[in-house]
Amino acid sequence: MIEVEVDNRSGVAVDEAGHVALACAVLEREGVSEGELGIQFVGPDESRALKQEHLGIDEATDVLSFPLDGLDELPEGEPRALGDLVICPHVVGDAWQEPLIHGVLHLLGHDHGAEMEARERVHRELLA
């Protein structure tokens, strides 16, 4: 079972259940059926500060991924800590699904490039 902790400090209403359901669906399709995931919704100022601090880019962004265990082999009995997704609803607007998929794939260790794009296309089927 994927355990998801949600924290909305963005100041706007978001579809928390929809975000959780999509993230879990992508994880399960990637072969991850157990683990812990955090989804945090933040405002543009916090998004900008995090992107500046971690990537050296001074702009608000749609989603940031902070992976922990990814798909690494873990000792038996140790829970998989997938990491955190930080989403800025002010940037993603109503088009949050694709950035969420992108962020989840980063948590699993996928990097930008052809393989990542192929994985994203596969998971877009969930949006139909």
Image: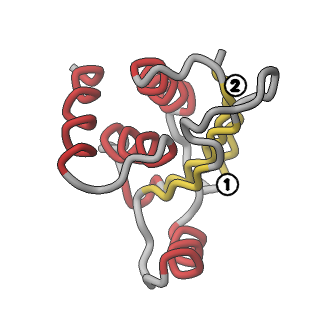
State the residue at coordinates (49%, 58%): 64
The picture quadrant where one finds residue 20 is: top right
State the residue at coordinates (64%, 45%): 83
- Name the residue tied to disc 2: 3
Q: Amino acid at mark 1?
A: Arg
Q: Quarter holding the C terminus? A: top left
Q: Amino acid at mark 2?
A: Glu
Q: Quarter holding the N terminus? A: top right
Give me the disc on residue 78: none
Nearer to me, 2 or 10: 2
Which-is-in-front pick, marks 2 and 1?
Answer: 2
Pinpoint residue 35: horizontal percent, then vertical percent: 67, 27
State the residue at coordinates (19%, 37%): 118
The picture quadrant where one finds residue 125 is: top left
Give me the disc on residue 9: 1
The picture quadrant where one finds residue 117 is: top left
